[in-house]
Amino acid sequence: MVKARQFLADAEGEFATGDHMQASEKMWGAAAHAIMAVAQQRGWRYGGHRRMIEATQRIASELDDEDLRSGLEASRQLHSNFYHDHIKEDELETITAGARRFVQKMLALVQ
């Protein structure tokens, strides 16, 4: 959980300096570590992308929270942006906000 918070803070700093590619990857790192924290707390397997996606879908179903699914998708888009730098500036803020909410919601589940 500490790593997720650190990556989230790092992402915010990178966005502030305009390094969108690094910020995108750090936001994905925050999301991934938040998922792992929830999965670990629940005794679920979480290694690899597929298992993290499955864990998030399971949690979203349990809580009936579609925002978790869309937040995961936003986080995955940011992960892809690190490699391809394809998200337009005007879309980046909305996608990042969704990923940020996702991380905060997931972390709230382990507190």
Image: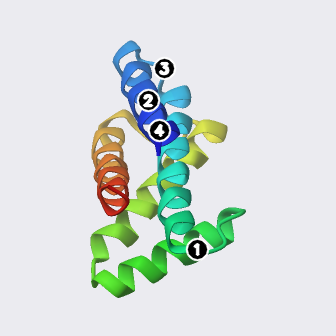
Q: Which residue is mark 2?
A: 11
How far is disc 4 from disc 3 in space, using C-alphas?
Answer: 23 Å
Placement of 44 over or under 4, stated as above or below: below
Mark 3 crowd level (few <14, some 14–19, many ≥20, 10 Å Cα): few
Label 2 vs 3, first from the N-terminus:
2
Residue at 71% x, 63% y: name it.
Answer: 47
Frontmost residue, 7 versus 107: 107
Name the disc covering residue 111, or none.
Answer: none
**Residue 67's quadrant in the figure?**
bottom left
Residue at 47% x, 64% y: name it.
Answer: 38
Q: Nearer the viewer, mark 1 or mark 2?
A: 1
Percent position of residue 106, x then y = 37, 59
Name the disc covering residue 19, or none.
Answer: 3
Mark 2 crowd level (few <14, some 14–19, many ≥20, 10 Å Cα): many
What type is the residue that disc 2 sits on?
Ala
Percent position of residue 16, x then y = 34, 18
Label 1 vs 3, first from the N-terminus:
3
How far is disc 1 from disc 3 in space, using C-alphas?
Answer: 36 Å
Tell me if 11 is positioned left or right of 28 in this view.
left
Q: Secondary structure at mark 4?
A: helix
Q: Which residue is mark 1?
A: 43
